[in-house]
Amino acid sequence: MMRQQAESDYRVAKPLENEEIRQLLRELSDWRQEGKQIERIFRFPSSRMALQFVNRVANLAEQERHHPDIHIFYDTVRLVLSTHSVGGLTAQDFSLAYKIDLMVGQDFPQDGWPQPL
């Protein structure tokens, strides 16, 4: 289900219902809901690798035209997704989270990095 949503175009965003949010969260790796947003924290072996990750996320966000809040703390990166225009979570948020998870598995698979917090 997540793959279909990740491949679809979400130009018209509508807020998701609580049950939809719970179901979609089960399909993601280490993302959690905080109010009207989802977030995931990544820890890397160095600040350099954390910045490389942030750059890749930024490029993906540009492609998707949907941008997370990005918080960088030396070797730790916190990503927060929400669709501000609807004041909550939409399929766009979960689609981007899914694509970030795919990117992490492809681009950062060595030695179990990043470590979930």
Image (spheres, rainbow, N blue to C red):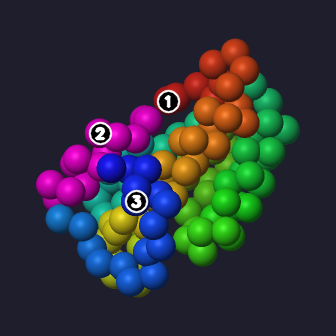
Q: What residue is disc 2 on?
A: 26
Task: Name the secondary structure under disc 3.
Answer: helix
On the picture, is 26 further left or further right than 83?
A: left
Residue occupying image coordinates x 60% and y 74%: 65
> Within the magenta stretch, is there residue 114?
no
Task: Name the secondary structure under disc 2.
Answer: helix
**What span is in magenta?**
18-30
Residue occupying image coordinates x 23% and y 47%: 23
Q: Earlier in the sequence, mark 1 or mark 3?
A: 3
Residue occupying image coordinates x 40% and y 56%: 4
Task: Name the secondary structure under disc 1.
Answer: loop
Distance, label 1 to label 3, CA atoms, is: 26 Å
Q: Are marks 1 and 2 in contact (CB under 8 Å)?
A: no
Crowding near pointer 3: few (<14 within 10 Å), some, many (20+)? some
Q: Are marks 2 and 3 in contact (CB under 8 Å)?
A: no
Residue 53 in which image quadrant: top right
Residue 79 picture location, percent across and down: 55, 52
- Residue 80 visible in this rendered orientation of the protein: no
